[in-house]
Each structure stands twice: as structure tokens, then as C-alpha cells.
Image (cartoon, helix red, strand yellow):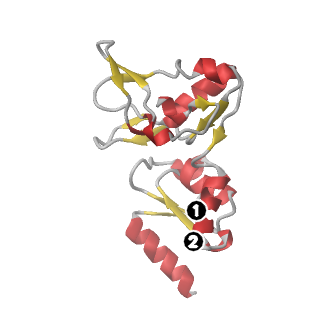
């Protein structure tokens, strides 16, 4: 779905859209989930969206995350790489519907009836999960050293994580100890 960055005049259901993805042999295939390139060597093509973006259609992206960690443990390009390509080429900024958009975090909290200052975000992405949540006004952002975490992530982005923990169990312990205080 070309990084979920479809430039559509109407709001369609992006989760059902597909991108044009070309395999190593040049054969056109249907795209992978959420615009991510998976299974073998594939290249997601933002070109089908580009004419629509420059014609001033709505330009939406589901995030600015540059990479993700695949099931094989390797980093792969995520939606942000393709959104950034369209943004650079068109000179337009997308409406970001996912992380790190403050609206993403605040809408999740609205359903929980939780004030932002009382919320804690736990994530493995220092930029999109943790810094995004803190910029949205959440009370704390914990970076876990799992998933796509890489050494040094804790100092790479501003604002920095409230704490860095080894895993989700350690994050739960951190949250419980603060709630008890």
C-alpha cells in the first residue's frame, strides 16, 4: 500500500489497500501488510502515489518510523521511509495518522479515560513510541531493550526516555513501583 501514504481525495480503508510491489524478477505482486516489504527481495514503489500527491490530494501516512524488526530479526524499511520519499519529492507534508503523532496517543487515552499525565508508554522505538508519547504530554515513556531497540537509542532522540528497562516484565515492575509510591 506504498507505505500507507495513499494520497486519496476520500478516506478509504487503508488496511484493505494494497501496494504495487515488484519482486526480484520484476514480476508485479500484491503488496505486503501495512506497506512493509517482506518475503524475499521486494521493492515497494511509491511512484503510483506520487502523481496524486502532487495533484494536491490528501496525503496521509501511518507513521514516520524508518525501520522495523522483521520476524527474522533483521531490520527492514517501514512506512516512514516511503512517506519520507513522497514528502521529499512532492514538497508536501503528510497528515500522520499513527505514531509519533500526538493525536494517535491522545485518542488512545481518550478511550481509556486516562489523563495524559497519568499515562505511561512502553515501547521498543525510542523515537516513535517513547519520544512521540512524551511530546504528546504523557507522564512517562519507557524504552524496552527488546524488539527493534538498538544500543544507543536511549540518547538518540529528544525527549529522552523516562527510563530504560530490559523487557516488559521490568516495565511492569517500574510502573507498579511508581504507582505504589
Q: Position of residue 117 (x, y in %)?
A: 67, 71
For label 1, count other residues whose C-alpha is less than 10 Å away and answer few (under 14), some (14-19) or many (20+).
few
Q: Which residue is mark 1?
A: 108
Q: Which residue is mark 2?
A: 112
Compared with 18, 65 (above or below) is below
Residue at 43% x, 41% y: name it: 68
Q: Position of residue 85 (x, y in %)?
A: 58, 25
Mark 2, secondary structure of its residue? helix
Q: Which mark is residue 99?
A: none
The answer to whether 164 appears left or right of 103 in the picture is left
Q: Quadrant of the C terminus?
A: bottom right
Q: How many marks?
A: 2
Q: Where on the picture, by quarter, is residue 23? A: top left
Along the viewing direction, whichever of 146 and 112 lies nearer the viewer = 112
The answer to whether 102 appears left or right of 25 in the picture is right
Along the viewing direction, whichever of 47 and 78 lies nearer the viewer = 47
Q: Position of residue 79 (x, y in %)?
A: 50, 36
Compared with 35, 140 (above or below) is below
Q: Position of residue 108 (x, y in %)?
A: 58, 62
For label 2, count other residues whose C-alpha is less than 10 Å away and answer few (under 14), some (14-19) or many (20+).
few
Residue at 49% x, 57% y: name it: 123
Residue at 38% x, 70% y: name it: 169
- Residue 159, visible in the rendered structure: no
Along the viewing direction, whichever of 61 and 69 lies nearer the viewer = 61
**Callout 1 touching callout 2 (CB < 8 Å):** yes
Amino acid at each position: 500500500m506504498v507505505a500507507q501514504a495513499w494520497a486519496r481525495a476520500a478516506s478509504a480503508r487503508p488496511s484493505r489497500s494494497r501496494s504495487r510491489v515488484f519482486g526480484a524478477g520484476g514480476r508485479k505482486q500484491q503488496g505486503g501488510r501495512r506497506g512493509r516489504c517482506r518475503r524475499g527481495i521486494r521493492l515497494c514503489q511509491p511512484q503510483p502515489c506520487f502523481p496524486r500527491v502532487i495533484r494536491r490530494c490528501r496525503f496521509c501516512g501511518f507513521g514516520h518510523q524508518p525501520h522495523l524488526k522483521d520476524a527474522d530479526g533483521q531490520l527492514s524499511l517501514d512506512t516512514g521511509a516511503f512517506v519520507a520519499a513522497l514528502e521529499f519529492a512532492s514538497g508536501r507534508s503528510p497528515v500522520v495518522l499513527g505514531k509519533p503523532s500526538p493525536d494517535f496517543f491522545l485518542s488512545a487515552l481518550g478511550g481509556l479515560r486516562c489523563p495524559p499525565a497519568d499515562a505511561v508508554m512502553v515501547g521498543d522505538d525510542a523515537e516513535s513510541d517513547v519520544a512521540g508519547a512524551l511530546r504528546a504530554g504523557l507522564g512517562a515513556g519507557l524504552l524496552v531493550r527488546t524488539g527493534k531497540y538498538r544500543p544507543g537509542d536511549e540518547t538518540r532522540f529528544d525527549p529522552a526516555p523516562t527510563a530504560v528497562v530490559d523487557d516488559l516484565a521490568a516495565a511492569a515492575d517500574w510502573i507498579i513501583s511508581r504507582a505504589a509510591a
